[in-house]
Image (cartoon, rainbow, N blue to C red):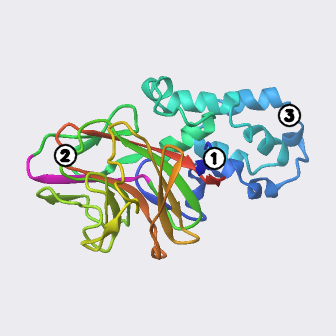
Amino acid sequence: MSGAAGGGGGSSCLGAAAAASCSSAGSPYAAGAGGGAGVAGRLPARVLEHIFSYLELSDLMRCALVCWHWYNILADENSEVWRSLCSRSLSDEALRSDILCNLLTYRGKLKAFQHALSSHDCSRNVYVKKNGFTLHRNPIAQSTDGARGKIGFSEGRHAWEIWWEGPLGTVAVIGIATKRAAMQCQGYVALLGSDDQSWGWNLVDNNLLHNGEVNGNFPQCNNAPKYQIGERIRVILDMDDKTLAFERGFEFLGVAFRGLPKACLFPAVSAVYGNTEVTMVYLGKPLDG
């Protein structure tokens, strides 16, 4: 069984530099820039928390590099600092609904928002709703429409949840894609997996798809159950082992794809049914156990 650690605009790959998008305040290297000497290291924690609560994410990332004292204050993922930034960045709907129910910290919720489906890297026939996490497909005939996450991954291990909140139609695919993969095409087809730039699992017929070919059924068991509307699927991308796996509920379904390329890979979805909705929530690094 796999769990996941609770963990801007435009798309970028989460490598050494782009990792600062929201996670560097919790990484060990962040405190290496100083030992806490000087005035900065002597300011009371409550004073610093109050000041930090007015700052934006990019400023907080720089603050975490100042000294151990500042780093330790920002390491509390449920502090007033992260709560304040969450309330400014996320919609009331996202914070009050069960969309983020599997994320237990404010910083985890903020990280999920930073990694959500992009409203700028998607088909013209879809849009991201005001909650910041749910994709809505307009009722356009003879079109397959997709979207990528805001941030792609070229290293490390990552997990996210995805679920349909409307009919699947004839094709409903979840998976990953490079920046080069198309996010719209004519007709009702399995867009993810239609070329060598994407890998997908069609939830309608349980087929795995890549390079325009069916790579077998998934999960590999007799009479595999079909996807149920509202059921959360966990996607696990391991860029170290170059694998993509899936989990349903608390059941690990297995590795779907191996030998992924050394490239920047983005969470992605594609849909065909008019007015259907798909929600994606980034969870962070998977925890095995």
Q: Which residue is mark 1?
A: 5
Q: Main secondary structure of the magenta part?
A: strand
**C-alpha distance separating marks 1 and 3:** 31 Å
Of the numbered discs 1 and 2, the one sitting upstream in the chain is: 1
Which amino acid, mark 2?
A: Gly
Name the residue rendered at 86%, 34% in the picture. Answer: 43
SS at mark 2 in the image: loop
Of the numbered discs 1 and 3, the one sitting upstream in the chain is: 1
Q: Which residue is mark 3?
A: 43
Which amino acid, mark 3?
A: Leu
Which amino acid, mark 1?
A: Ala
178 and 247: which is toward the camera: 247
82 and 196: which is toward the camera: 196
Highlighted range, magenta: 141-150
Of the numbered discs 3 and 2, the one sitting upstream in the chain is: 3
Q: Residues within 10 Å of mark 2 (few under 14, many from 20)?
A: few
**C-alpha distance separating marks 3 and 2:** 58 Å
> Which quadrant of the figure has residue 18?
bottom right
